[in-house]
Image: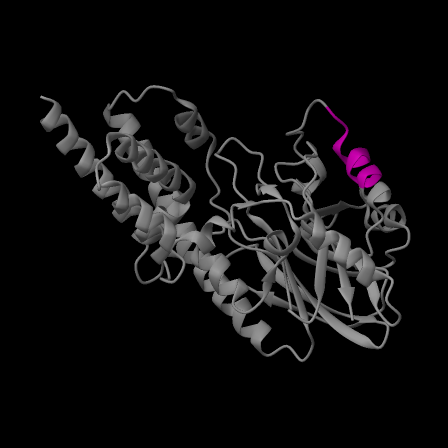
Amino acid sequence: MRKILKKIILILNILAAVSLVASYISAFVSPEKFWIFAFFGLFYPFLLILNILFFVFWLIARKFYFLLSFICILAGLPFIKRIIQIDNPFHDKYYYQQKYQPGNTTFKLLTFNVRLFNLYQWESKTDAVTGIFHFIEREDPDIICFQEFYTRENSRVSEEKVKSSLKKCNNAHIYYSVNKKSLSHFGIATFSVYPIVGKGEIKFPNTFNLSIYTDLKIGNDTIRVYNNHLQSIKFLKEDYGLMDTLKLKYNEKQMIGIQRIIFRVRDAFKTRSQQVNAVAEHIKKSPHPVIVCGDFNDSPVSYSYQTMRNNLKDAFIESGNGIGYTYRGKLPSYRIDYILYNPLLRSYDYQSPKLELSDHFPVICRFILP
């Protein structure tokens, strides 16, 4: 009986190891071509934990089978760094020293999906609008990138009041993808203390999601900031209800619901891959060093992240610590909001404060421009 049990565990271990490798592959295969890999990437953290458990089990059992998961985990070490970082006190100490070197310019960037400033009262226990602007005032960033930006004329979130609330960041690049009844406006926005010397939009077909780029004059240099809001899954209310269900009943209604969720996730993967390809090609042609930030709506082990990052550095990897997660919705939390940047820049003091004013946490990082 024990031999049969160990054989079953071994088979499960093989499946887990193969799935972990498939999650690595997901970062390099476009969901448009083969979407099934994207699901393995989505479950990477769970597959990693599962393989660690198998590794420990076989090690305790003194069986060489532990090598199966061990080798697969080793092969994916660079992916682990995208999920968790160990605090390096020497990193920030070094860059704080660099901050005061003659000729160096420092600035602070904040990116935040503000969820339409709580337009539909998702956060019922707090005044999200006041909280968001008080938070920004305390943080005092030099560059602010908003996704799911919303203004309404003659209201507390009118464009004029938003601009006045941001005070020193009085240079604005705002693009509205939706104008509703000429009073309400939905879009994306970048605000800056630095002069804007160029700007544009990257529009995606058949969606309200988009990216904008803003050229900022910082001292004698020009930096291009890409502010992105890539395709979300757009679950329906009944989808969330099904995912909240603790017990599967395997009836026809539930199976149809599960199938609907899978198709929604699949379609979002495909659409994001098209969007990220368009932005990545645009980035390659940028005449200036770039910072790429925003809500990618995808995990760090994904084609979207891998393609967008390319040769850029990830602020979390370079100057963050702890477990990276920026989404606080009902689904398992992932890091889906990012700050990527040209290696000519130096980052330090990466933070993602656990601010419960949106379904996303803000992401903040300081930069040195040598």
Magenta-span inclusion, residue 60:
no
Q: Nearer the viewer, residue 201 or 226?
A: 226
Please report the residue visible at 80 percent of the width from the left and 76 percent of the height from the top. Answer: 221
Please report the residue visible at 38 percent of the width from the left and 62 percent of the height from the top. Answer: 28
Relative to 369, residue 132 above or below: above
> Quadrant of the rendered structure where residue 356 is?
top right
- Image coordinates of residue 120 in percent, x first then y, are 65, 33
- In which quadrant of the rendered image does the C terminus lie? bottom right
- In which quadrant of the rendered image does the N terminus lie? top left
> Quadrant of the rendered structure where residue 212 is?
bottom right
Q: Does any portion of residue 153 appear in the rendered image?
A: yes
Please report the residue visible at 74 percent of the width from the left and 52 percent of the height from the top. Answer: 92
Q: Is residue 71 left or right of residue 295?
A: left
Relative to 361, residue 159 above or below: below
Q: Does any portion of residue 364 appear in the rendered image?
A: no
Q: Nearer the viewer, residue 120 or 7?
A: 7
In the rendered view, how is the structure colored?
one colour
Q: Nearer the viewer, residue 268 or 289?
A: 289
- Image coordinates of residue 22 in percent, x first then y, are 31, 52
Please report the residue visible at 57 percent of the width from the left and 73 percent of the height from the top. Answer: 282
> Quadrant of the rendered structure where residue 84 is?
top right
Q: How many marks?
A: 0
Helix, strand or loop for the magenta stretch, by majority = helix
Which stretch did the figure color magenta?
126-135
Q: Is residue 176 left or right of residue 98?
A: left
- Image coordinates of residue 297 in percent, x first then y, are 52, 49
Relative to 324, residue 348 above or below: below
- Image coordinates of residue 161 in percent, x first then y, are 87, 46
